[in-house]
Structures are given as C-alpha cells and as structure tokens.
Image: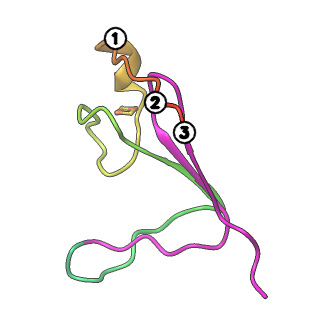
C-alpha cells in the first residue's frame, strides 16, 4: 500500500501537497515536483500552478476550516 498523501490548506497562502502524487496539466503532461510542493491558491503567482510567495504581497486572506 502506498504512502498517505496530505493536502494542507495553509492559512492566507498555498496548498501544500505532501506524498507520492503526480501533478499533471490539463492535457496530462507531468509537472516536475518534489516530495512536497506548494500550489498557488491566491491566483497571483508568476509560477503557476506553484506558489511563489506572492500571496504575502497581495495580503491574500483565507482561513478555511474543515467542519
Ligand atoms: S498562494 Fe502563494 S502565490 Fe498564490
């Protein structure tokens, strides 16, 4: 059985993905990723789909909680 994957929604920032996953684009091509990586959630990254820290500059605010 494979390792469990964790997807964490960071407060005011990225989506952190950790584990054995493949990240593909809309036509199925693989993005090169490490064992853990951060996806942009604010929409302002210059390096989409990855987070480049721009969320801090634009004061992105979002703190969703699982109920
Ligand atoms: S979430 Fe970090 S740049 Fe968008």
Total numbered labels: 3
- In three-dimensional space, the C-alpha distance between marks 1 and 2, rounded to whole angstroms, equals 16 Å
Residue at numbered disc 2: 64
Does label 3 or label 1 sit earlier along the sequence?
A: 1
User: CB under 8 Å between callouts 2 and 3?
Assistant: yes
The residue lying toward the viewer, choosing from 8 and 55, is 8
Q: Residue at position x 43%, y 70% from top?
A: 23
The stretch of residues the image draws in magenta is 1-25
Residue at numbered disc 1: 59
- Crowding at dot 1, Cα within 10 Å, few <14 / some 14-19 / many 20+, comes out as few
Which residue extends farthest bottom? Answer: 1
Of the 4 image quadrants, the one containing the N terminus is: bottom right
Q: Residue at position x 29%, y 48% from top?
A: 48
The residue lying toward the viewer, choosing from 14 and 31, is 14
The image's colouring method is rainbow
- Asked whether 42 falls inside the magenta stretch, the response is no
Q: Where's residue 8, x and y in %?
A: 58, 44
Location of ligand 1 given as a quarter of the image? top left
Relative height, residue 30 to residue 59 (above, below): below
Residue 66, which numbered label? 3
């Amino acid at each position: 059985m494979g390792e469990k994957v964790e997807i964490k929604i960071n407060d005011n920032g990225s989506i952190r993905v950790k584990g054995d996953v493949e990240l593909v684009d809309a036509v199925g091509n693989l993005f090169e990723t490490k064992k853990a990586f951060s996806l942009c959630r604010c929409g302002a990254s210059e390096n989409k789909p990855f987070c480049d820290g721009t969320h801090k500059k634009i004061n992105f605010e979002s703190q969703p909680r699982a109920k």
